[in-house]
Amino acid sequence: MLHRHADNRSVHQLIQSIQSQDLTERVKAVGELVNRGPNAKEAISVLLAALRQEDEGIRILSAMALANMGSEAREATQVLLEVRRRERLNARWLMSCCIDRIEGRFSWRAYLYPIMYIVNILIHGLHYECLFGKSVGIGDRFIRIHKNNIELFINALKDSQEEIRVRAVYALGCIGDVGKEGIAALIAAKNDPSKDVRDDSAWALDKCLRKTRGIWPAE
């Protein structure tokens, strides 16, 4: 099943994980450093490098981790100013909040951020991707949980790694309307050798059977 476990690794171990080839492992490690504050200052150089990584989620989490170090991470200000220019609106706003925190300034942006989030939802709809969006790690990248990626998640159900199959089932369940092919793939997943995949596929099927159009006779 899908569970969250506390990460009790040392800062040195987290630094090593950030340099991993596995995207999911990198995101988990940077996310844990967000909670370490100034105690993780030895990770500053690695987090500065992470600000330039391709994945938006890692860039944002790295900015948050540096912000929580306060003045210890003052060298990050210039990098954040440079990176911020290439980010989307929400990410730019959050990075500005991070700079304010590092510099010890009152951050009026932090108070307005929830308002901006609501405005974005009203403009773009409830599926608006706030920050780095809702996605799952499949292989060496994050894939957005969206109907346009249904085929990718169906194919991922055949992956040799159990964890990837579990994530694919979860993603299809979140999408809901996955079409006949998605339903068929989830039914097949009920025979997966992994108990976690079988159990999660039952949950996903329940959601998808209620939401997928075209599988029930017209009333």
Image: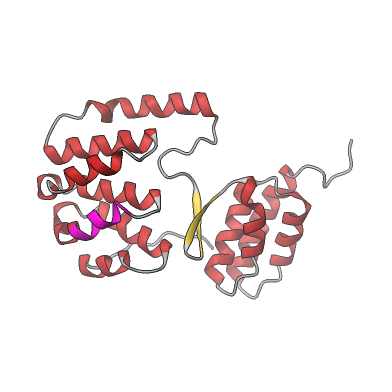
Please give the range of residues in magenta. Answer: 45-52
Residue nearest the observer in this picture, 178 or 23: 23
Quadrant holding the N terminus: bottom right
Give me the residue at 26% from left, 46% from top: 64
Q: Within the image, what quadrant is residue 213 found in?
A: top right
Asked if residue 50 is among those painted magenta in the image, a careful observer would answer: yes
Q: Magenta region's main secondary structure?
A: helix
Q: Is residue 37 above or below residue 116?
A: below
| Residue 181 percent across, percent down from the top left | 76, 56
| Residue 8 percent across, percent down from the top left | 28, 65
Quadrant holding the C terminus: top right
User: Is residue 37 found left or right of 194 in the rendered image?
Assistant: left
Colour treatment of the image: secondary structure
Give me the residue at 20% from left, 38% from top: 99
Give me the residue at 15% from left, 61% from top: 42
Q: Is residue 139 above or below residue 150?
A: below
Q: How many marks?
A: 0
Give me the residue at 26% from left, 47% from top: 63
Residue nearest the observer in this picture, 68 or 56: 56
Residue nearest the observer in this picture, 99 or 214: 99
| Residue 115 percent across, percent down from the top left | 37, 24
User: Is residue 25 found left or right of 82 in the rendered image?
Assistant: right
| Residue 109 percent across, percent down from the top left | 26, 28
Residue nearest the observer in this picture, 182 or 21: 21
